């Protein structure tokens, strides 16, 4: 899940993912959308501690100021994916699928809000 600026494209998200993979993280206060999303998703599916039956293949989740990375077990229930997509939309976050590189913007009416400095 990525907190991007208004007008961000899938290419912008992919570039941000690449920077993250290279260990380059934005130095700023955590985006409130990311914080709210992390709290909401871990309230349903705790990541600390990882417990039996958790959907997380890797726990705790990787959370940075502008994104949360979630690695799910391939066998996790479809409801987990639906909950993640719903919460991403509620918080105006763009979803990046690590498996195929697809980027899904928030539903219309829930576009990312502008971020200072962009």
Image (cartoon, helix red, strand yellow):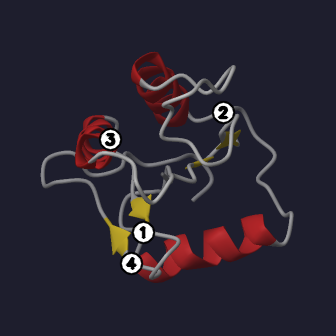
Q: Residues within 10 Å of mark 1 (few under 14, many from 20)?
A: some
Residue 51 can be seen in this image: yes
Crowding at mark 3 (Cα within 10 Å: few <14, some 14-19, many 20+): some
Label 2, label 3: how many angstroms apart (C-alpha)?
24 Å
Q: Earlier in the sequence, mark 2 or mark 4?
A: 2
Residue 67 appears in view: no
Dot 1 corresponds to which residue?
A: 8
Identify the mark at residue 100; answer none if there is no mark: none
Q: Nearer the viewer, residue 23 or 46?
A: 46
Between disc 3 and disc 1, whose residue precedes? 1
Q: Earlier in the sequence, mark 1 or mark 4?
A: 1
Residue 67 horizontal/vertical position (percent) = 59, 48
Image point 65% across, 27% down: which residue?
A: 50
Label 3 close to label 1 by CB (< 8 Å) = no
Q: Check disc 3 and report the residue beneath it.
A: 80
In what element is the residue under mark 4?
Answer: loop
Please give left or right for residue 30 compared with residue 106 in the image.
right
Residue beneath disc 4: 102
Q: Is residue 59 above or below residue 5?
A: above
Mark 2 to mark 1: distance in Å?
18 Å
Where disc 1 sits, the SS reads loop
Residue at the spot of label 2: 30
Q: Is residue 78 left or right of residue 70?
A: left
């Amino acid at each position: 899940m990525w907190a991007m600026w208004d007008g961000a494209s899938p290419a912008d998200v992919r570039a941000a993912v690449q920077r993250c993979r290279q260990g380059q993280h934005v130095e700023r206060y955590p985006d409130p959308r990311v914080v709210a999303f992390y709290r909401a998703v871990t309230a349903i599916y705790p990541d600390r501690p990882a417990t039996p039956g958790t959907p997380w293949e890797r726990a705790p989740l990787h959370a940075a100021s502008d994104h949360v990375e979630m690695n799910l077990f391939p066998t996790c229930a479809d409801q987990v994916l639906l909950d993640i997509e719903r919460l991403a939309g509620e918080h105006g976050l763009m979803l990046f699928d690590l498996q195929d590189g697809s980027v899904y913007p928030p539903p219309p009416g829930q576009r990312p809000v502008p971020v200072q400095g962009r």
